[in-house]
Image: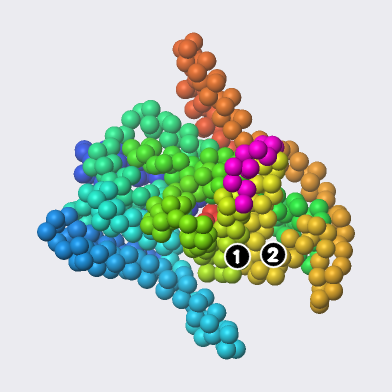
């Protein structure tokens, strides 16, 4: 079940919201949300619910004794290790076992030793969330959860279950016992959801359609203009697609009384790679910072150790996205760029004109998305070569055409592309915020106008969905 499907929009969520609203207290609301979250997850593949239940159960049992002050430190570490290994072990089995085994086998001429298994949807997200619970309890950052159903609700809560944001237990523990659904919260959550739905249906899906029309997968017939247009379109698609899911998750959470942290902050406005990763998929960056980078010593170490820490973190970040060499290469690319910024440029980075920093960052990010797009690294490198007008065939270098008939797509979709460029900036939000402050001072109908716009976006999105087939979010595959 996807947020941008009619089953969710017209049946599942209205029914969930109604049942929550008529619930008498927080206990009943939690019960409703837990049942509906399990229904949401099992809608497509019921058997995979067992993996999520198993991870939750092991981490619940391992964390429960950690509140005992008399328990020896060694025993606590053992329990922590069991909980972490249970989650990561499951993730490694489903997502990485075949990749690593076949990679090693490839060294001996056998790359088909183990067939990949079907990947349970959302496993990269819910295993990380279960892990944060046990680690947070061990670190005494959060209280132990004695009620296993509440822990299962935290892990399985449907707004952020399948594609994030990654919610750390310490940030949400109190809300499992004390939250309120308010009219203002519902209205603002509804607006946020409508904006997210519009980003997915009207912008991200359009980018995907144009990429297909452009033939980005066929790097052999790519032109220079086509290569650049494809890189730009995919950069826009993945941003609007994933930020749309985050908007919808945050909006749904708000309507249900939860407060989730922001996951995007106009990343394409970043003026450095460091700044980009403070703005893009913020919850993933926070996870690797809090649970990997800082425990490794962070930046409070020597230069060589800092380089190693960054390469480990970004190698894992790339690998988290998938068991494929292109993701590993993509992760290490960012590791190298961040090392260059921190250890080579240092303070000199701030003396470079802001416009040049933003241009360089955008180009580097687009280059990264090209690598990210193609699971076959050779195709990604061929696309990168096409950006500068060259290709290699059978070891022979050759130039490629500047453009072909597909350049007309640029004119055909000029207006939507322009709107997308504007939507990547805080311009619209800045104007809306200023108008809101101005209207509030005059006590005018800002709330009504904003709600009408949101309903309009919802209606337009539903209209567009009628003609679209199944449109899962890009991050479902991770």
Work out which residue is located at the far top of the displayed protein and give it: 442
* SS of the residue under disc 1: helix
- Was residue 129 drawn as part of the magenta stretch in this picture? no
Number of numbered callouts drawn:
2
- The answer to which quarter of the image holds residue 189 is top left
User: Which residue is painted at 80% across and 57% down in the image?
Assistant: 388
Per the picture, the main secondary structure of the magenta-coloured stretch is helix
Residue on which disc 1 sits: 329
Q: Is residue 338 left or right of residue 448?
A: right
Q: Quadrant of the N terminus?
A: bottom left
Q: Nearer the viewer, mark 2 or mark 1?
A: 1
Where 373 falls versus 346 (above or below)? below
In this view, the residue in front, 427 or 467, is 427
Query: In the rendered structure, which segment of residues is drawn in magenta?
Result: 344-355
Q: Residues within 10 Å of mark 2 (few under 14, many from 20)?
A: many
In this view, the residue in front, 117 or 124, is 124
- Locate residue 143, reporting x and y percent: 22, 49
Q: Residues within 10 Å of mark 1 (few under 14, many from 20)?
A: some
User: Which residue is painted at 87% across and 63% down in the image?
Assistant: 399
Q: Which sits earlier in the primary sequence, circle 2 or circle 1? A: 1
* Cα–Cα span, label 2 and label 1: 11 Å
Tell me if residue 411 can be seen: yes
In this view, the residue in front, 167 or 356, is 356
Work out which residue is located at the far left of the displayed protein and give it: 70
* SS of the residue under disc 2: helix
- Report the coloring of the rendering: rainbow
Instruction: State if disc 1 and disc 2 touch (CB < 8 Å).
Output: yes
User: Which residue is painted at 60% across and 65% down in the image?
Assistant: 329
Residue on which disc 2 sits: 380
- The answer to which quarter of the image holds residue 181 is top left
- Locate residue 410, reporting x and y percent: 79, 46
């Amino acid at each position: 079940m996807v947020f941008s499907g009619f089953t969710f929009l017209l049946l599942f969520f209205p029914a969930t919201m109604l049942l929550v609203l008529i619930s008498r207290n927080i206990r009943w609301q939690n019960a409703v949300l837990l049942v509906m979250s399990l229904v949401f997850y099992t809608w497509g593949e019921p058997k995979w619910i067992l993996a999520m239940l198993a991870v939750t159960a092991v981490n619940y049992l391992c964390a429960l004794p950690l509140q005992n002050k008399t328990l020896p430190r060694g025993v606590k570490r053992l329990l922590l290790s069991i909980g972490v290994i249970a989650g990561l072990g499951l993730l490694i089995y489903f997502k990485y076992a075949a990749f690593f085994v076949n990679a090693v086998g490839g060294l001996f001429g056998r790359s088909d030793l183990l067939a990949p298994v079907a990947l349970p949807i959302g496993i990269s997200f819910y295993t990380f969330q279960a892990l944060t619970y046990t680690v947070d309890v061990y670190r005494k950052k959060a209280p132990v959860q004695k009620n296993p159903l509440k822990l299962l609700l935290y892990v399985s809560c449907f707004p952020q279950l399948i594609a994030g944001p990654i919610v750390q237990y310490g940030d949400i523990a109190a809300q499992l016992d004390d939250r309120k659904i308010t009219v203002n919260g519902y209205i603002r959550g509804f607006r946020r959801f409508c904006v997210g739905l519009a980003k997915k249906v009207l912008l991200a899906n359009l980018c995907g359609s144009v990429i297909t029309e452009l033939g980005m997968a066929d790097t052999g017939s790519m032109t220079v203009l086509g290569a650049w247009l494809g890189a730009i379109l995919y950069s826009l698609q993945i941003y609007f697609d994933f930020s749309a899911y985050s908007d919808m998750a945050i909006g749904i959470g708000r309507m249900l009384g939860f407060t989730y942290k922001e996951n995007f902050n106009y990343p394409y406005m970043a003026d450095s790679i460091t700044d980009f990763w403070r703005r893009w998929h913020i919850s993933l960056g926070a996870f690797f910072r809090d649970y990997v980078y800082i425990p490794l010593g962070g930046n409070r170490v020597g230069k060589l150790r800092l380089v190693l820490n960054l390469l480990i973190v970004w190698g894992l970040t790339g690998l988290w996205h998938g068991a494929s060499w292109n993701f590993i290469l993509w992760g290490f690319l960012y590791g190298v760029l961040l090392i260059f910024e921190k250890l080579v440029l240092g303070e000199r980075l701030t003396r470079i004109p802001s416009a040049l920093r933003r241009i360089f960052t955008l180009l580097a990010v687009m280059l990264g998305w090209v690598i990210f797009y193609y699971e076959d690294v050779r195709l990604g490198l061929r696309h990168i070569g096409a950006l500068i007008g060259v290709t290699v065939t059978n070891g022979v270098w050759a130039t490629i055409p500047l453009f072909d008939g597909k350049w007309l797509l640029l004119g055909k979709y000029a207006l939507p592309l322009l709107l997308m460029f504007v939507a990547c900036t805080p311009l619209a939000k800045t104007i809306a915020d200023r108008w809101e402050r101005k209207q509030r001072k005059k006590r005018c109908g800002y709330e009504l106008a904003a709600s009408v716009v949101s309903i309009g976006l919802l209606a337009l999105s539903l209209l567009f969905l009628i003609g679209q087939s199944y449109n899962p979010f890009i991050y479902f595959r991770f």
